[in-house]
Amino acid sequence: MKLAILSCAPKAYSTRRLKEAALQRGHDASILNTLKFAIDLDRGSPDLYYRQEHLENFDAVLPRIGASITYYGTAVVRQFQEMDIFCANTAHGISNSRDKLRSLQILSRHGIGLPRTTFVRDKKDVLPGIARVGGAPVVIKLIEGTQGIGVLLADSVKQAESIIELLQSQKQNVLIQKFVAESKGRDIRAFVVGDQVVAAMRRVAQGQEFRSNVHRGGVAEPVELSEEYRETAVRCAQILGLRVAGVDMLEGADGPQIMEVNSSPGLEGIETCTGLDIAGAVIDYIAAQVDFPEIDVRQRLTVSKGYGVSEIYIPDGSKYVGQTITQTQLRESDINVLTLYRGTRIIPNPRADRVLEAGDKLLCFGKMESMRGMIPRKEQRRRRPTVQELDTSAG
């Protein structure tokens, strides 16, 4: 396999380890500076140049895109994708994860545990927003911070209001987030590769510091995750479109609470802590995908007119609740169930005798007309009467 590692920091631990792991396995690996590419566009022939030379053929790309170059970095990754070269993380996945608000918006609709969060712009919305997340203390986050930078803890409402006002005056977008007190300055980093958590560590903040990032002085220890935490980490990465990710979770009273999903997770802290060859696991996964690539069904299974991929939600009260997949007669309607999502569980190719429950989601491929017929119409919200109507009815 000929592998391109995109990185502006060739001497960084993670970059060196990834190249070393690739070479140890007999692969040809090159570290390419992401900012030294030129993107050429022409009808039917997307192309790349590197340091003014036409880029040689590569089998796979492993992006290590820094936050400061997200726009250009994802453009380069997207060009590799258009050239049909396997990318360990896609441009779409990197973009989803890099913006904290965007990633939380995507995850929130999939039943993933999150600290209660609000995003406000108007000064008048700040105090109501703080109240909605549970009041002080609150965590205030810059939308595009990394390694604990731009994460602040406000002990009082007045302090929170002052911090937010200051940041907004500097044209910074901030999130207001519930402080999960039971986590006690601890969090978990799960390193996801493909559909597995290959390593995990618990990071513990030191002294008065509430941020547990290793870059902020946090101490790390290896941890064996429960099935709930492993499934949550893998599902978060998959929802955001990442194959290699660091998923940061708080240990909340109600289970895992997602803080952030990192598309370029560092290797030094977690390899040192666990003693595992995580770089090797990443390289092995990429090599396997080059030999036998996964197909994105959402993009590839829409070639037949009238057919496609869709998610079907099974609400409480649906006639399908309590029925097996066979009893629903979906197959007779030309609908095939590819995956069943139940809570944090992902059940690929579910058995025909699997009984459906309220809240299940089915990822299906089939006739779009049939699938549309299964989706219940959204109930129209009751329109609130106007002040004039109220006055009229009162008279």
Image: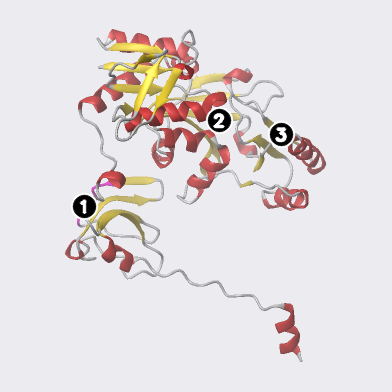
Q: Residue 93's x, y, as percent?
A: 43, 35
Residue at the front extreme of this rendering: 43
Q: How is the image coloured?
A: secondary structure
**Whole-Å distance between the Cαs marked 1 and 3?**
48 Å
Residue in the image at 76% along x and 50% along y: 127
Residue 149 lies, in percent from the top left, at: 64, 26
Check disc 2 and report the residue beneath it: 187
Tell whether position 381 is magenta: no
Left or right: 163 as drawn, with respect to 272 = right
Which stretch did the figure color magenta? 348-352
Answer with the quarter of the image where residue 153 lies.
top right
Quadrant location of the N terminus? Answer: top left
Compared to residue 247, the image places residue 331 above or below, namely: below
Label 2 and label 1: CA atoms lie apart by 36 Å
Question: Within the image, what quadrant is residue 245 found in?
Answer: top left
Which of the numbered marks, if any, corresponds to residue 189? Answer: none
Side (left or right) of 126 relative to 299: right
- Looking at numbered disc 1 in the image, what kind of residue is underneath it? Arg
| Front one among 83 and 45 | 45
Q: CA distance from mark 3 to mark 2?
A: 15 Å
In the picture, the disc for residue 351 is: 1
Report whether 53 appears left or right of 378: left
Residue position marked by numbered label 3 in the rendering: 153
Q: Earlier in the sequence, mark 2 or mark 1?
A: 2
User: Image quadrant for the C terminus?
Assistant: bottom right
Q: Amino acid at mark 2?
A: Asp
* Residue at left offset 78%, top offset 52%: 124
Kind of residue indicated by mark 3? Leu
Does residue 253 lie above or below 362 as drawn? above
Mark 3 secondary-structure assignment: strand
Whether residue 321 appears in this view of the structure is no
